Image (cartoon, rainbow, N blue to C red):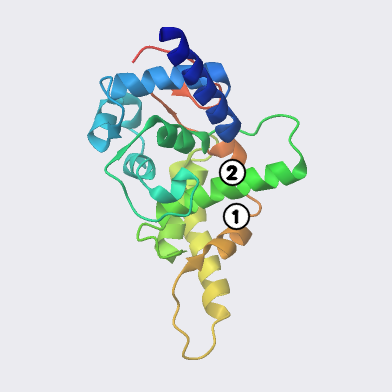
Amino acid sequence: MGSSQSAQEEQEYRALAERTGFSLDQIRNLHKRFKHLSHDEETLRKEDFDEISDLTPNPIRSQIIDAFFDKRNFGGNEVGRVQEIGFREFLTVMSHFRPLRQNLTEEGIERIRREKLRFLFNMHDKDSDGTITLDEYRSVVEELLSSSAAIEIETATAIADAAMLEVASVTVGEMAPGQVYEGITFEHFLEILKGVEIEAKMHVRFLNVDTTTVRCGKL
């Protein structure tokens, strides 16, 4: 029985590795973190994330946590929120924070970049209407820039303000008379952030796990 269960778990891990890009060892380590946070239950709830001390000082803590319960980030076409998630959903969301693997084709790099930007877009499109407002876009730029130790927060804010004005001039400037501005679409979001190296910036350290390496550590 134990051998059969172990073989089934190994098969599930391999399927998750293929889907998310994590190695088998990384998946095993993350599963241990998941079980610790869930108190050995099969699902996680938002309140379980309160135990993660690494997330406490993060300025976008609430957005990161919300992202784990957003159906848009589970790899399907569903929209909406859930109250709890299983390990598969947890790992799928974590995979959005992984850096690029080596030896990827240009097509693979572009696909992963698009997935990361879609994830980032979803974090700020809180009502799931397919657009983000100019103020929401300003916060996206500020968060991306302030993650760099080489840029002070005041500088990041000034650049974000300028970026918001630039987007406003582009999007609103192209509107026809009488047309109502509804916000930035995902395709426009891709175009706006074309020069931003999102692959290097979009990772997060919590659960005592750095998504650039996914190392083991004590909780």
- Which residue is painted at 46% across and 70% down in the image? 183
For this view, does 50 lie left or right of residue 75? left
The residue that mark 2 highlights is 198
Q: Which of 176 and 35 is in front in this view?
A: 35
> If you read the primary sequence from the N terminus, does the residue marked by circle 1 or circle 2 appear first?
1
Q: How many labels does the image show?
A: 2
Q: Is residue 169 above or below residue 119?
A: below
| Label drawn at residue 114 | none
For this view, does 151 lie left or right of residue 218? right
Residue type at tag 1: Leu
Image spot of residue 89 (x, y percent):
42, 37
- Which residue is painted at 26% across and 37% down in the image? 46
- For disc 2, the neighbor class at 10 Å (few under 14, some 14 to 19, many from 20) is some
Image spot of residue 79 (x, y percent):
39, 56
Secondary structure found at label 1: loop
The residue that mark 1 highlights is 193
**The C terminus, quarter of image:** top left
